[in-house]
Each structure stands twice: as C-alpha cells, then as structure tokens.
Amino acid sequence: MSLAELICPAGTPAALRTAVDAGADAVYCGFQDATNARNFPGLNFTPDELAASVAYAHERGTKVLLALNTYPPAGKVDLWYQAADIGARTGVDAFIVADMGVADYIARVHPQVRLHLSVQAAASSPEAIRYYCENFGVKRVVLPRILTIPEIRQIRTEIPCEIETFIFGNHGLMVEGRCSLTNFLTGQSTNMDGVCSPASDVEYVRDADGSMSSQLAGFTIDRFGPEEKAGYPTICKGRYTAPHRPEGYYAFEEPVSLNLSRLLPELIDAGVHAFKIEGRQRSKSYVRGVVRAFRAAVDDIRAGRQANMADLVALTEGQKQTQGAFETKKWR
Amino acid sequence: MSISSETPFPRRPGESVVARLSCLAVQPILTRIVRRIATRHPSLFARLGPHQATDFLIDPQELPFALHLRPDPQALLLRAVPRGAAPRAGATIRGRFLLLLELIDAEQDGDAAFFSRDLEVSGDTEAVVRLRNALDDMDGSLAEETAAMFGPPGRAILARLRRTYVGETTALENT
C-alpha cells in the first residue's frame, strides 16, 4: 500500500527545520563534501549539524535520509565510508546511495540502516532494481524521471522494494549518474565531485541592452533577452546555435521544472510509496512553500478530498512546468 | 574565475549630493545592524569560507546609495556608498530593496527571483552562492530584528515599506 510519504530537501540546518515544521515525513540532506550530488559552496551539513538536525527531526516524528549518492573515484572510497560511519552513528534513518561499493560497505558494516537507491544509479528496469535489492538489501528505489505511470505501475509488481518518484523541482533527464557535460567543460565531475555547473565556473554578464548571458568556464551557454525568464546555468538546458539552427535552440532540454501535483492521485494508485521534492540548493522560502503545498495535497487525497494545490509556477525554473514523461513519452 | 567589469551605474542630476548625505545618515544604523548580526549569528561566517574577504556590492535599485559588505569576522564592514564612488567589487547583487530584504529573511526564493530576472548577480558567482546559503541558514528575520532595534517607530517604518512594496509589485504584475 502506498503511504505517500513526502520526502523533502534541506541544504542547511535551518532548511531542515523548515521542512520538518512544514510537514515533511522525511528530509534528505548531505555533508559538505563530494559524497553527495549537491556539493555546492556554503551548502550542506557538518557532522555536528547533522546530529542536531536528526535530533530535531526525530523529536517531531520526521525521518532523516543521508544522501551519499555520488561515485567514489577508483581507490578513493574512504570519504564515503567515513560519511556512512558518521551517518550511522548520528542515527539517520536511511542512506541514499548510487555506487555499488558504497552500498556493499553499508550493507556489511551498518546493516541496521535502510538503503535507498538514488536516482543517480539510473535503475529503471525491474532487473536492475532487483539486482540492488538482492545483493545489497535495498529497501527503496528512486526512479529516474523517464517512466510513464503505467510503466511505474508495472515495475511495482515486479520488484521487492518500495518506489519513490520525484514530484517537483529540477527536471533532469540525462541518464542520471552518467552525465559528463560539466566535466567536459570544467574538469569537475557531477557524478564524483557532486557538482553540476560549479558556481566557481559560472559567470553572468549583463549586456547594455539588458540582456544577460550565462557562461560556464568561459563558454556562453545561454543568452536571455531583457524580459525573458532565465534558467539554471547548466549545459543540458543551454541554448545553442548550429549551422542548421542559426537562431539558437535548446539542443538537449529546456529550462523547465517538474510538477506532478495533478498526477498525485494516479501515482498513489500506482503504488508509489514516497514522493520526492527536489531542491537542496534552494532556499528556506522554497522549502516552506513547496512542502506546505504538497503536504496539504497529499493529506487531501488521503482523506478522499480533491487536492487543491497552491500555484507553484513562480518557484519553477524558467517559470515553466511540465509533467514530463510521467504524463506521456511524447514530452519532448 | 574572472571578475566581470561592473555595469556602469546610471547617474541622475544631483544624485551625488543626495547619495552622500544619505550615506552619512544611514551609516550608524548599518554599523549597528552588522554588529548585531555578527553577535547573534556567528555560524554564518563558516559558510562563507574563503569569501569572508570578498567585497560584495549590494545595490538596492531604488535607494540613493549602494551597500558595500565585506563579511570578514575580524574586520566586519557594511557601509553605504554613493554609486559613483562604489569600490570595485568581487560580486554584485542588484534588486529592489525590499526584495533583497525578503531574500535575506527567506520570505522569497533567490533562484525564483533570478529566474524572473528581478534579481541580478554579476562577478564571482561562488561568492554570491556562499553568501546566499550563509544568510539562508540564519534563523529569524533580519528585517524584524533591525526594526525592533528602533522600537515602535522602526516597526512602523518596516510595515509601511512592506505595504508599499506589495502594492508596487502587485501593480507591476497587473501591467
């Protein structure tokens, strides 16, 4: 049975408290290093902050999930193992992992702590998911954002673990955990260093006419007109010219956010156990607004009422939203 | 990363006199504010990391001056500067005054303000991200704390500013 747990992001202790107070069933967070995929400057938790945050959450009946969802470079696993040891000592309720070596370590050394399979593992078939369940005791899989609801419903019948899907936030559709675009331009790895478009390589340049160019490592990846809404400075959502498209076009994806609020009843009916809100890099204001909106919606649906969702478009990237592949494979 | 050259500030006739007088008037308040923040929220400096020594220029568009911030806990600096005399900054953050205040107080989301183009940043993006994350981890309301420093008149001024901002924002959205 779907419990429709609400899994909410926190980039700082204050954001974690905000998420808990706004009605999160669980909050996910990470350390201030490469062990998680939001290794951004000034973001994340020290071990002491995590311990205090776990205590705050547990006192209020909220779980804390620790993201260890990057891939250690070959032979450099100590940082990930130490992070797992600290997390277990701190009393986190689950680890979110992508790498098999990290999963294996936790399964052997900290078998009392649940393992969730990160979207960064890109496990989208029953066979792949079952492999993680059988070999590492994974209890939940976070599905990539490439599946329709009928496909999720089918997978649910073929795997022995819970399903978590994203419902709001960044709409990353690359083969997750395999994207090397940032690495190509900056030398830093999204998957091993935890940085997608590192801020140290990003620059915004305002032109005299009010246009703004976003640049990564010196390469212009988009240019927004004076009145045009902007997006994140990520290569996958950049606009490029090509011989056949001299006017410039989105070669990979458009700056747009996922919003599945209208599909919540169908997702619950399909057996999705938990709903994830993306955005550890976002502010307390975002966390408060989105968590409250989805808390109310999930509670309405559980009570058999029509969900009356708050309008969240102002918080979306490019101020545009989509239901992506969850609605139809024709999303692109 | 490179530091971009700052966009020239548009100057209006008589602005420099007004700006200099305004700077003199607000400086004692700014000094009190920044000392209070440092005392009450010491943990924010750790999140700034190497950017404690960065010069930030915060440009509230409708005020007659900009703010120069250097968040060095050993030599904390927040001063009002006429735009024409603003120092070369490592990072610049520009937007409407109350939007900036609401961002600090987590009443608005910085990314959303960036997407809508109401917030503009230039220079060292990492410095801006660190400052944003440091401030976002601060509990309480800086606006309320500052207003409370001046008692009922301070709170009344803040309430009036907010009403004006909400009114103007609504009017802009309806145009």
Image: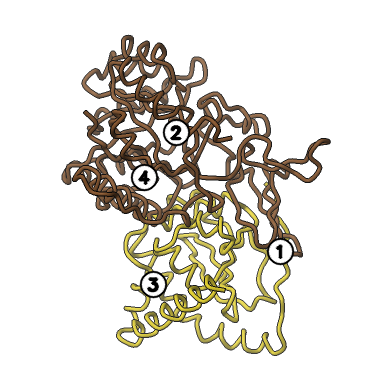
Observer-nearest of A143 and A195: A143
Q: Is residue A239 left or right of residue B155?
A: right
**Which residue is pictured at 62% across the width and 88% down the height?**
B18
Q: Quadrant of residue B150?
A: bottom left
Q: Position of residue A179 (x, y in %)?
A: 58, 27
Label 4 vs label 1: CA separation? 34 Å
> What type is the residue that disc 3 sits on?
Ala
* Chain B palette colour: yellow
> What type is the residue that disc 1 sits on?
Gly
Q: Which mark is residue A210?
A: 1
* Contact between labelled residues 2 and 4, with CB atoms less than 8 Å apart: no
Residue named by callout 4: A10
> What type is the residue that disc 4 sits on?
Ala
Label 2 vs label 1: CA separation? 37 Å
**Which residue is pictured at 31% across the width and 10% down the height?**
A134
Label 4 vs label 3: CA separation? 23 Å
Q: Position of residue B47 (x, y in %)?
A: 44, 50
Q: Secondary structure at mark 2?
A: helix
**Which residue is pictured at 45% across the width and 46% down the height?**
A281
A307 over A82 or under it: above or below: below
Image mark 3: chain: B
* Chain A palette colour: brown
Residue named by callout 3: B143
Within 10 Å of the Cα at label 3, are there few (<14), some (14-19), or many (20+) other Cα atoms? some
